[in-house]
């Protein structure tokens, strides 16, 4: 079958779906949807439709990015715009089917917004809402709109037209086009993609490989997972184009095992490609042949580093080696190899489908196009976002993210994960692009964006990141293996109240040595979270070291819980729930926490009735409290909080 | 990495052992014997046996014509592989950044309390194993825990008991 025939058939199927007189129900069943309960929602939809005897089309789609409102269910009635409902439960499903499908009441009270032409009274346009208004969807444009397990949906929406266009061009022309687009690697380092391809293309050798790095190991980042789950073909199309441009006949997708659904979607997509003969020998009648294998990772963060990743594909321990030679010269099995990240490959497909000039019209001078981010942490609207480069942190955190959780004060935002840094409020108006983030002391990274509030301790975060990199260090080179361990020991001392005044400088000195001496990116960037937190939050380090105080009240060794004798009503709720048996007192007797027994689990603070609010968490100071329980009457105090 | 010693493992009854050997042979026969296949083989063997038994690793070495030390080296490098039998139901608690910021420590503490084991350990009846994992990529629903392929989002220490009870009920 020619591509024109495949396309015609796909468009016919897509059109038939849209012209159908049956209502359509779209359920977001990517991993985040499932984590929020999408499978129960799906089961409830099936049950209700059966019981009400309604003939509807139910489609499972990927993630539209509004993870904070998962599970998401969209209903499209013929002639009406699509209505998106959030935080759907099986109970809400029953209401929606009864009210909207049967009685034609679209239930504006449950809706997030409408998508598409025409409006519905009382429901806003979804893409006009602050959460989506400043977003720009290129890579994620099909996520949440198509069935990711149906190649026809992808093709009907422009899919594989980029490949067809590419096959009619010379490989060098494609590389020029990618260069012209200004695309830079989305894995973190931001190397110009076209240039990288050119190195590999020009590298001598008949046998060449391309690899898709889907080993998204940065804790706090899930952009690649979501894309693979929601639109796997966009990544495969990018790879096919890249293989043709570079001259590779074989390729690999290295995807982490922690992403079972992404792996499943990739396998299905690859099978469909084979059925359509869009992969294999002589693709679409051309001289271009390409074979692709999926490799499942086995749980090692360092395998996100390109030389370690290649060692892992070869079946070895995933340990990096020194560069040069770069993979473009000597990569997989010593052959020229080109590795790009999932998002980079998907961008390639979009660039070939719609042209380099179109793509380059978005973004800034040095950073073209868009970037996906996982906006998470202490922010109201967590989720997957895609924004044009040049947008400010403030727009991302306050417009898209809504606000800081529970009205707390913003403290910083971590970009680049364990290799990046945490930027304080002064940088809220910094444009988000490769160069601005680097000059601010952080990095773009792969797209994890973790928002922290006043309740986050920056020293604890630095310890958290170093404990992660220390655990994940492969152990090959000493600066990383021992250096991160030394840094961790010092940070452990600091958070446990054993910090010495010279520790902060020692950390900085060690950090520089590790950065300079480590073999691969893991070690070279591991000290970054410590360095930026010292640079921007030195006061917090000083409080820990000099005053043995944790200002954010996080570090367990430096905090204490007390019961305010003025407020305690002697209700014994905390006394009974204390797992350590550390609370002394009785009915109508002011409770006292035995500091020697207290494990600082915080149960008493959580459980003390808000109307009493008698448990206090402090650090560095000891409020005036009795040593032993005192009966409330004999205390002779005014009972302010009593009802 | 995750493990450091080879299983001393209880002796399985003869028939069970024979069936296992047969299963191992079946797995190996679906591969060609290239070094590239080592990790997929180990993954499949672990899926069947629940861990990497020492005799199986020796057999894989012969099959791939690699030194036993290489198989052991790979088996100990990746966090996914276990060299000792582990609990049937693996409870994985995420310790990623987003989860950490939103209270993963409390979730892990509660699971530890409920199961009476620490990360990397299994209960003595080998019903449950506890693992702390770097990141599952469900960060927007942090904190999360994972049992089998089910991801439980927006966890609270109070919900831990409920989720664990569900696993018990599914047994």
Image (tube, rainbow, N blue to C red):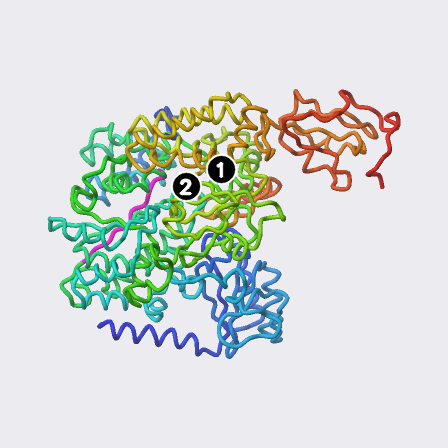
User: Residue placed at 50% from the left, 23% from the top?
Assistant: A493
The chain under label 2 reads A
What is the magenta range? A290-300
> In this view of the protein, which residue sits in the foreground, A187 or A599?
A187
A61 in magenta: no
Secondary structure of the residue carrying tag 1 is: helix
* Quarter that holds the C terminus of chain A: top right
Distance of label 1 from label 2 (alpha carbons)? 10 Å
User: Residue placed at 39% from the left, 39% from the top?
Assistant: A419
Comes first in the chain, label 1 or label 2: 2
Tell whether A218 sits left or right of A406: left
Evaluate whether residue A238 shows in this view: yes
A295 in magenta: yes
Evaluate whether residue B92 shows in this view: no
Q: Please tell me whether residue A443 is drawn above or below residue A179 in the rendered image.
A: above
Q: Mark 2 highlights which residue?
A: A441
Image location (x, y in percent) of residue A532? 44, 37
The 10 Å Cα crowd at callout 1, few under 14, some 14 to 19, many 20 or more, is some
Count of numbered circles on the image: 2
Q: Are marks 1 and 2 in contact (CB under 8 Å)?
A: yes
Q: Which mark is residue A536?
A: 1
């Amino acid at each position: 079958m020619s591509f024109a025939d495949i396309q015609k058939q796909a468009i016919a199927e897509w059109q038939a779906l849209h012209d159908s007189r049956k209502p359509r129900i779209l359920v977001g069943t990517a991993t985040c949807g499932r984590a929020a309960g999408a499978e129960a929602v799906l089961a409830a939809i099936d049950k209700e439709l059966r019981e009400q005897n309604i003939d509807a089309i139910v489609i499972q789609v990927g993630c539209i990015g509004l993870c904070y409102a998962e599970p998401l269910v969209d209903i499209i009635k013929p002639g009406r715009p699509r209505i998106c409902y959030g935080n759907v439960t099986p109970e809400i499903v029953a209401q929606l089917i009864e009210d909207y499908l049967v009685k034609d009441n679209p239930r504006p009270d449950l809706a997030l917004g409408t998508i598409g032409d025409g409006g519905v009274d009382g429901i806003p346009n979804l893409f006009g809402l602050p959460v989506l208004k400043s977003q720009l969807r290129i890579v994620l444009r099909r996520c949440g709109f198509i069935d990711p397990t149906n190649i026809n949906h992808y093709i009907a929406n422009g899919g594989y037209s980029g490949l067809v266009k590419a096959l009619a061009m010379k490989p060098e022309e494609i590389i020029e086009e990618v260069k012209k687009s200004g695309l830079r690697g989305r894995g973190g380092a931001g190397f110009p993609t076209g240039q990288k391809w050119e190195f590999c293309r020009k590298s001598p050798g008949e046998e060449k490989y391309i690899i898709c790095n889907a080993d998204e190991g940065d804790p706090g980042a899930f952009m690649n997972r979501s894309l693979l789950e929601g639109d796997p073909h966009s990544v495969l199309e990018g790879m096919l184009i890249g293989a043709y441009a570079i001259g590779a006949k074989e390729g690999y997708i290295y995807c982490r095992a922690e992403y079972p659904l992404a792996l499943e979607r990739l396998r299905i997509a690859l099978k469909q490609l084979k059925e359509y003969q869009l992969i294999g020998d002589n693709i679409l009648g051309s001289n271009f042949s390409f074979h692709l294998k999926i490799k499942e990772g086995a749980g090692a963060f360092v395998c996100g580093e390109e030389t370690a990743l290649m060692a892992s594909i070869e079946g070895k321990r995933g340990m990096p080696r020194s560069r040069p030679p770069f993979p473009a010269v000597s990569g997989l099995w010593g052959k020229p190899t080109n590795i790009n990240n999932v998002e980079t490959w998907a961008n390639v497909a979009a660039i070939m489908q719609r042209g380099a000039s179109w793509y380059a019209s978005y973004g800034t001078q040095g950073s073209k196009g868009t970037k996906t981010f996982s906006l998470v942490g202490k922010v109201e609207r967590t989720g997957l976002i895609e924004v044009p480069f040049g947008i400010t942190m403030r727009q991302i955190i306050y417009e898209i993210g809504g606000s800081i959780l529970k009205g707390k004060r913003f403290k910083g935002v971590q970009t680049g994960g364990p290799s990046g840094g945490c930027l304080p409020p002064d940088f809220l108006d910094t444009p988000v692009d490769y160069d601005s983030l680097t000059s601010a002391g952080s990095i773009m990274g792969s797209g994890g964006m973790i928002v922290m509030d006043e309740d986050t301790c920056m020293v604890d975060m630095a310890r958290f990141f170093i404990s992660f990199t220390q655990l994940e260090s492969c152990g090959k080179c000493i600066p990383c293996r021992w250096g991160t361990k030394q840094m961790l020991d010092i940070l452990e001392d600091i958070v446990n109240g054993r910090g010495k005044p010279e520790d902060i400088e020692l950390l900085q000195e060690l950090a520089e040595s590790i950065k300079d001496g480590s073999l691969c990116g893991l070690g070279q960037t591991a000290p970054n979270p410590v360095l930026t937190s010292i640079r921007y939050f030195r006061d917090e380090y000083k409080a820990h070291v000099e005053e043995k105080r944790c200002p954010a009240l996080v570090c367990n060794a430096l905090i204490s819980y007390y019961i305010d004798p003025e407020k305690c009503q002697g209700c014994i709720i905390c006394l009974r729930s204390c797992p350590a048996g550390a609370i002394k007192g009785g009915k109508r007797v002011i409770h006292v926490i035995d500091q020697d027994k207290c494990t600082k689990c915080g149960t008493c603070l959580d459980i003390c009735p808000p109307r009493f609010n008698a448990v206090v968490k402090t650090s560095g100071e000891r409020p005036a409290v009795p040593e032993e329980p005192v009966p409330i009457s004999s205390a002779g105090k005014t009972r302010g909080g009593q009802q | 990495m995750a493990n450091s010693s080879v299983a001393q493992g209880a002796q399985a009854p003869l028939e069970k052992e024979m069936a296992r050997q047969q299963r191992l042979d079946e797995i190996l026969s679906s591969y060609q014997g290239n070094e590239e296949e080592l990790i997929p083989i180990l993954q499949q063997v672990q899926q069947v046996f629940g861990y990497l038994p020492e005799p199986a690793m020796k057999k894989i070495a012969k099959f791939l014509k690699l030194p036993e030390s290489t198989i052991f080296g790979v088996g100990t490098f990746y966090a996914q592989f276990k060299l000792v039998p582990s609990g049937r139901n693996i409870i994985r608690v995420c310790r990623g950044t987003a989860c950490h910021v939103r209270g993963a420590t409390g979730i892990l503490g509660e699971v530890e309390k409920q199961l009476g084991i620490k990360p990397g350990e299994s209960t003595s009846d080998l019903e449950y194993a506890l693992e702390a994992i770097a990141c599952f990529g469900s960060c927007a629903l942090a904190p999360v825990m994972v049992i089998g392929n089910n991801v439980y989002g927006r966890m609270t220490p109070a919900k831990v008991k409920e989720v664990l009870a569900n696993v018990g009920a599914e047994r």
